[in-house]
Image (tube, grey):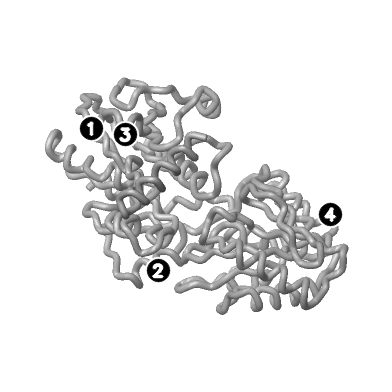
Amino acid sequence: MKNLIKDTKKLAGWFFNGYLERDYSYLEKGIFERSFEENMRLNLVISSVDKAKMYGGLTTAVNMYDYLCGILDCDRRMIVTSDEVTDKVMAQYPEYCLQNADEDSEKRKVISNFCVENGKRKGLSVRAKDIFLATHWSTFYIISDVLAFQREKFQTDNHILYLIQDFEPGFYQWSTEYLLADSTYRAENTVAIFNSFNLKDYFKQLNYKFEYTVAFEPRLNQVLLQHLKLIDTMKRKKQVIVYGRPHVARNSFSIIVGALNRLIEKYQPGIEWEFLSIGGKHKDVKLSGGRVLKGCGKLTLEEYAKILAQSSVGISLMCSPHPSYPPLEMSTFGVVTITNSFLCKDLSEFNENIVSLDIVNFETVAEALHAAMSKYTETKRVSKKSKYLELDNQFVEVGTMIQKVIEK
């Protein structure tokens, strides 16, 4: 109801003033306060640490943060910028203490709420040896002035670590948000950490320049890896799974729905074929011919692994240079997976189960679906020899780079 009232006020203001007033309070910068604690501390600046709300990107950020803290043997602070840290969230991190953002102490592992309250953020304590790891353009923007503060108060020349997991200006139309996101890629003293070499190459094509750059490749989630053996015993159903997130434009949900309708209208697949949508919460979608795309929402990793092992065909689109995790996961579990190429991205080389389309529209996706469904088989042998499945840590090169930067 609060959001409805807020949106109504915005629309009324638009009607009265002739322009839509946007709320940028989420970009408010807090006031930095000097701390005299001397230990080095790595600060994860992140929108939420609630594991119940985490998708691949936030999970990757926390995993990389844990790895870096381990090799640096430093104090830890997770600074949460958007999602209030509740007792329920703190219970997910029993080793951490909740600490006010403007306070400091000798505690080695803390979580601080740095959310906007009444249009403002509270102060943030800063040490001479604080290193900040931003995880999204907005978190970089919020924290970007900290280097100047450290230079003034401590005469240090630090760097901000910037985990870049997509080309985030592309999340918006050409607009204020686009320019704000773009500005974070042009700051000095930045260590850019790219999630995939595809993405790193894309930034190079666009001529962005960072003082230091490093990249890592995705690895299969450890829980999914433990359940990969399911593909040896489970029979495949005539089941199509789609990565369905209607609220995330880059996942192109409308193309998927349109392609399913074209498929049904043109090829009339047997009634035994089922269509499941996983990833984002939404109601069942009515398709042509009385068929249904069942909305399964966000699954546990165990549930997800079982569906992967049972499914024959998958669709996962990503209108960005990042490969995204679902096509890699689906294809690794033996699902013939339809996805899209992008500048600097062609996943067809990842394994034999990926069909990467250069031309993506309702018809091309429908044709690819029909071709994949026509090759249905109950069992399928899948190669388990891939760097994607290796147990060595994916962040080793990142850690080596960060250590060199800090030691300079």
Q: Which mark is residue 119?
A: 3
Q: Which mark's residue is nearer the viewer, 3 or 2?
A: 3
Q: Earlier in the sequence, mark 2 or mark 4?
A: 2
Which residue is under mark 4?
A: 233
User: Disc 3 marks which amino acid?
Assistant: Gly
Which residue is under mark 2?
A: 202
Real-space Cα separation, disc 2 to disc 4, in angstroms: 40 Å
Tell me residue 128's x, y (percent).
21, 34
Real-space Cα separation, disc 3 to disc 2, in angstroms: 36 Å
User: Disc 2 marks which amino acid?
Assistant: Tyr
Q: Is residue 190 left or right of residue 399?
A: left
Dot 2 falls on a residue whose secondary structure is: helix
Q: Is residue 236 left or right of residue 15?
A: right
Real-space Cα separation, disc 4 to disc 3, in angstroms: 55 Å
Q: Earlier in the sequence, mark 2 or mark 1?
A: 1
Residue 181 seen: yes
Q: Residue at x 69, y 49 (%)?
A: 283
Q: Earlier in the sequence, mark 1 or mark 3?
A: 1
Please tell me whether residue 163 is drawn above or below residue 383 in the rendered image. above
**Near-viewer residue (66 or 206):** 206
Q: Quadrant of residue 271?
A: bottom right
